[in-house]
């Protein structure tokens, strides 16, 4: 397993300084926009695609959790039929929405993954024999990335081939990072998968799984205790978060360089107009969600 330790100035980068970096990813004067589902008491953006569609989930006034799609300026609430709890984690390039649902209002108990196709059809995605399953991402080929656990409550990850969807029951379980206690896959781009893992010494690290080989992604700045990769785009640029002194910060990793932000980076996407979109959220009790577009 390889390890990436890319040089970056020690300490935390202020948002304004990071945005002024010379990387072409960081345009001059980008604009942050708050995204809150109307009437919600909390919202979290989880993904976007190259059409500018944005997905996530929100908490309504009755404390119920629902998914949402923001497309062309319009919010659409997403609830799996008959479920009491719905989360949305990702959206594919063609507009398929992925998430999980539960029969309980609080989301306790078993979960089931689902895909809401671009033409409006819900399909449950359950790994065979698992207690809970989650669908978190889909690439341009229609391959579904997800996670699952059995009765031991240990997280595992899977890919369901697009050629097999929607025929349930045919999955490929991904290998864990060698020596890791827990491996969590978060996003898929082509055949590449990114996420985070907890090592035997309880330290947290990001990873890239490409061509069957794991590469550890760690921000080497002084004081960083945890790195997680949340997204990867078609150029191989990655977005994620890292922790210093117990505080979360976002990052973009491009051309071998980490660029830190004061908001936790969740998703990065290269659009048809050669723009890149990064989704960030504020890790505070207000749960405000922010987005910005970089030229």
Image (cartoon, rainbow, N blue to C red):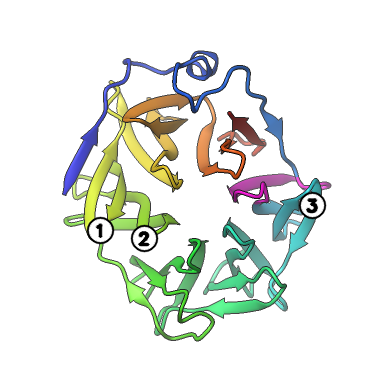
Q: Nearer the viewer, residue 146 or 40?
A: 146
Q: Is residue 182 magenta?
A: no
Q: Which structural element holds mark 2? A: loop
- Distance from disc 2 to disc 3, alpha carbons, whole Å, reads 31 Å
Disc 3 secondary structure class: strand
Tell us which disc is closer to us: 2 or 3: 2
In the displayed structure, 27 sits above or below 71; it is above
Contact (Cβ within 8 Å) of mark 2 with mark 3: no
Q: Which residue is mark 2?
A: 191
Q: Earlier in the sequence, mark 3 or mark 1?
A: 3
Q: How many residues crowd around disc 3 within 10 Å: few (fewer than 14), some, or many (20 or more)?
A: some
Badge 3 is on which residue?
75
Q: Quadrant of residue 241?
A: top left
The answer, for residue 203, to whether it is visible in the render is no
**Which residue in the structure is indicated by mark 1?**
211
Residue at the (41%, 39%) spot, across then down: 237
Q: Which residues are magenta?
A: 37-54
Q: Do we see residue 129 in this rendering?
A: yes
């Amino acid at each position: 397993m390889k390890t990436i330790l890319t040089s970056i100035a020690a300490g935390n980068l202020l948002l304004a300084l990071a945005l002024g970096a010379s990387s072409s990813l960081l345009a001059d004067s980008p604009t942050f926009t708050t995204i809150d589902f109307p009437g919600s008491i909390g919202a979290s953006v989880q993904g976007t695609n190259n059409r500018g569609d944005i997905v996530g989930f929100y908490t309504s006034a009755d404390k119920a959790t629902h998914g949402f799609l923001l497309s062309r300026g319009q919010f659409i609430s997403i609830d799996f039929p008959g479920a009491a709890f719905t989360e949305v984690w990702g959206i594919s390039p063609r507009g398929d929405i992925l998430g999980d649902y539960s029969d309980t209002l609080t989301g306790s108990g078993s979960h089931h993954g689902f895909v809401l196709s671009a033409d409006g059809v819900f399909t449950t995605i359950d790994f065979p024999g698992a207690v809970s399953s989650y669908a978190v991402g889909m690439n341009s080929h229609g391959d579904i990335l997800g996670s699952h656990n059995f009765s031991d409550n240990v997280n595992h990850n899977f890919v369901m081939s697009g050629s097999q969807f929607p025929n349930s029951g045919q999955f490929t379980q991904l290998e864990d990072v060698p020596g890791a206690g827990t491996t969590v896959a978060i996003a898929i781009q082509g055949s590449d998968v990114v996420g985070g893992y907890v090592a035997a010494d309880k330290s947290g690290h990001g990873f890239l799984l490409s061509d069957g080989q794991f590469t550890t992604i760690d921000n080497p700045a002084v004081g960083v205790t945890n790195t997680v990769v949340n997204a990867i785009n078609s150029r191989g640029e990655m977005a994620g978060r890292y922790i210093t002194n117990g505080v979360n910060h976002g990052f973009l990793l491009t051309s071998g360089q980490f660029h830190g932000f004061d908001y936790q980076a969740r998703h990065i996407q290269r659009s048809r107009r050669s723009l890149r979109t990064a989704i960030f959220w504020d890790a505070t009790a207000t749960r405000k969600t922010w987005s910005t577009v970089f030229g």
